[in-house]
Image (spheres, coloured by chain):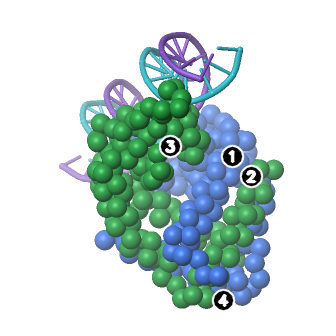
Chain colours: A blue, B green, C purple, D cyan
Amino acid sequence: MSPTPTQLIELFVLASSTYYQEFAAVADRHDLNSTQVKLLILVREPQSMRALARQLSCDASNVTAIVDRLERGGLVRREVAAHDRRIKNVVRTPAGDETVQLIRDQMQATHQALTSFTGDERVMLATLLTRMHTALDGETSG
Amino acid sequence: MSPTPTQLIELFVLASSTYYQEFAAVADRHDLNSTQVKLLILVREPQSMRALARQLSCDASNVTAIVDRLERGGLVRREVAAHDRRIKNVVRTPAGDETVQLIRDQMQATHQALTSFTGDERVMLATLLTRMHTALDGETSG
DNA sequence: TATTGTTATACTCTATAACTATA
DNA sequence: TATAGTTATAGAGTATAACAATA
């Protein structure tokens, strides 16, 4: 039985909001919010405050607050860049690495739900999601 | 080429965040935020404040503010229930119906991006999204 | 002059608690 | 007593503008 367009969209919205809720819940177990965890994951490689603001689509002043919070928790530290002393790079500490690993573990069951498909299904899902995102991207920029 | 689990998840997160941004942008064109539009769409049938709070997963006091805002804009009105005068039902006005229709139109291109698949692809996507949501749901409640 | 990051500030969103009016 | 809705209030998140340090 082929679903209607409305049903497809409802399914998509439902699946993604459930995923986001789970992400927020896992972050909360570490006394962090979603944005703080996103930043923590982003700094796999050291990044300047400004670069992080761009990737999080938020103002630089917010990054100051987010990094303050993570730094107080000992999960990241600021390092003044050698070549340009205006720039501060955010670097993950070993404790930060550990937290990211724990969060990955705790998201594993959720991620498995998204990826427990056969090879063929996986290719199909990736194709469809890519096509959706490409089409959406064309829309939003127009 | 089969995508890795990580790639699949990144695609999924990317597609859903782009969708959500587009929804917020369309809402903004009507001087509304996402939650206000969600409520406006929910009141296809009149609903009590309390029922709306449940569906929006927020406190009842927030619904008061959201409905205040929509009522000031003439998009909904409050109606005291005949059988229980404590209850106020939120009812969409003709202007509210019109706004919902406009938002539907403005989301059409985006929705088309999510549903422009052949019959077979559509069935497959629905199957996969359902399986994802079911699995996620099992996770979050545990 | 321009850029990076910070601070001060205000606005929005959300939750909690106390309140009212009804049941 | 219990429930529906409101109000007052406080906390978190975000954006803007002004600022200091550096380029």
Q: Residue at x 45, y 71 (%)?
A: B111
Q: Callout 3, which amino acid?
A: Gln
Q: CA distance from mark 3 to mark 2?
A: 27 Å
Mark number, residue B47:
3
Q: Residue at x 63, y 75 (%)?
A: B126
Q: Chain of mark 3?
A: B
Is B45 positioned to the left or the right of A72 in the image? left
Q: CA distance from mark 4 to mark 2?
A: 31 Å
Q: Which-is-in-front pick, marks 2 and 1?
A: 2
Q: Are marks 2 and 1 on the same chain?
A: no
Q: Which-is-in-front pick, marks 3 and 4?
A: 3
Q: Which is more N-terminal, label 2 or label 3?
A: 3
Q: Residues within 10 Å of mark 3 (few under 14, many from 20)?
A: some
Q: Quadrant of residue D6?
A: top left
Q: Callout 2, which amino acid?
A: Thr
Mark number, residue A116:
none
The answer to which of A48 and A16 lies nearer the viewer is A16
Q: Quadrant of residue A130?
A: bottom right
Mark number, residue B1:
4
Q: Chain of mark 2?
A: B
Mark 1 highlights which residue?
A25
Q: Is residue B99 above or below residue A70?
A: below
Q: Callout 1, which amino acid?
A: Ala
